[in-house]
C-alpha cells in the first residue's frame, strides 16, 4: 500500500478514493443520550424503516473531495448503481488514473463490474481490502461522522428531510478540507 500511496501522491494524474456503501434510516439512531437522574429519555420514532442507501467515496491524498450517490432504501444498491458511480468518478477526474480502495462485496465482484473494470483498466485500478478490515477503508470514518452529525433524538418526517440534511453535511464536508483530512488522510493507512 505504501508504494501505491507514494505513486499517487507524487503524480498529478493519479487520485485515490476509498469507496463504500451505507444505509441510513429516517428514524433516530439511538446513539448516546443523557437525561437527569430518574427521568427516562424520550426518543421519537415513526415506526418505519424508511431511509436511504448511499454509495460514497472520498479522495484521501490531495483535495479530500467527497462524492455521494443517494437512493431510497426501497432501491437496493446493485452492480448497476456501482457502475454508474464508477463512471461518475472517472467523469469528474478527466485524464486521471483513479485508484479505488473497496471491499469484496458482491456488487463489486459481479461479472458486470469485472467487465467494466477490464474495459477501463488503464484509468481505474481497484485495491481490494482484506476481509474484516474496516480500518483500511477510510470512507467508513466519513460514514461514522455523517451518522453522528445526523443524530438527533427525534425522527425525521420524510426521506426528503433526511436527504436535505445529508446534502447540507456533504456541502460542509466539501467546504472544510481540514475536517475530512483528519478523518481520511491516506498516510494513516500505513499505521
Image (spheres, rainbow, N blue to C red):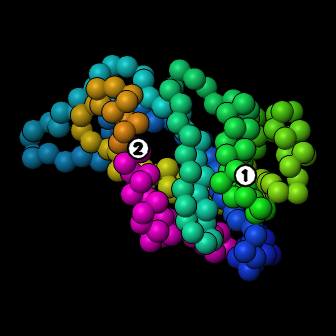
Q: CA distance from mark 2 to mark 1?
A: 23 Å
Q: Is residue 168 above or below residue 10?
A: above
Q: Is residue 178 above or below residue 58?
A: below
Secondary structure under the numbered disc 2 in the rendered image? helix
Mark 1, residues whose alpha carbon is within 10 Å: few (<14), some, or many (≥20)?
some
Q: Nearer the viewer, mark 2 or mark 1?
A: 1
Secondary structure under the numbered disc 1 in the rendered image? helix
Mark 2, residues whose alpha carbon is within 10 Å: few (<14), some, or many (≥20)?
some
Indicate yes or no whether the magenta region holds residue 76. Answer: no
Q: Is residue 162 above or below residue 137?
A: above
Question: 104 or 133, which is in the foreground?
Answer: 104
How many numbered badges does the structure rendering display?
A: 2
Residue located at (81% from left, 38% from top): 113
Indicate yes or no whether the magenta region holds residue 172. Answer: yes
- Name the residue carrying label 1: 90
Residue located at (58% from left, 57% from top): 58
Point out the tag, 2 or 1, that comes first from the N-terminus. Answer: 1
- Residue 137 lies in quadrant: bottom right
* Residue 129 in view in this figure: no
Q: Position of residue 125 (x, y in %)?
A: 82, 56
Tags 2 and 1 touching, CB below 8 Å: no
Q: Position of residue 42 (x, y in %)?
A: 18, 33
Residue located at (42% from left, 22% from top): 49
Q: Position of residue 183 (x, y in %)?
A: 50, 65
- Residue 185 lies in quadrant: bottom right
- Name the residue carrying label 2: 166
Quarter in which the N terminus is drawn: bottom right
Amino acid at each position: 500500500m505504501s508504494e501505491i500511496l507514494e505513486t499517487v501522491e507524487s503524480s498529478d494524474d493519479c487520485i485515490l478514493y476509498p469507496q463504500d456503501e451505507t444505509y441510513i434510516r429516517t428514524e433516530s439512531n439511538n446513539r448516546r443520550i443523557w437525561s437527569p437522574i430518574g427521568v427516562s429519555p424520550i426518543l421519537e420514532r415513526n415506526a418505519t424503516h424508511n431511509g436511504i442507501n448511499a454509495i460514497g467515496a472520498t479522495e484521501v491524498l490531495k483535495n479530500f473531495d467527497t462524492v455521494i450517490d443517494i437512493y431510497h432504501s426501497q432501491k437496493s444498491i446493485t452492480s448497476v448503481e456501482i457502475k454508474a458511480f464508477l463512471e461518475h468518478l472517472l467523469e469528474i477526474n478527466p485524464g486521471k488514473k483513479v485508484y479505488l480502495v473497496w471491499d469484496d462485496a458482491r456488487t463489486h465482484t459481479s461479472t458486470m463490474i469485472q467487465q467494466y473494470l477490464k474495459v477501463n483498466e488503464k484509468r481505474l485500478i481497484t485495491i481490494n481490502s482484506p476481509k474484516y478490515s474496516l480500518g483500511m477503508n477510510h470512507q467508513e470514518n466519513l460514514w461514522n461522522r455523517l451518522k453522528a452529525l445526523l443524530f438527533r433524538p427525534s425522527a425525521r418526517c420524510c426521506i426528503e428531510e433526511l436527504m436535505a440534511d445529508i446534502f447540507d453535511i456533504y456541502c460542509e464536508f466539501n467546504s472544510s478540507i481540514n475536517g475530512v483530512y483528519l478523518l481520511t488522510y491516506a498516510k494513516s493507512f500505513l499505521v
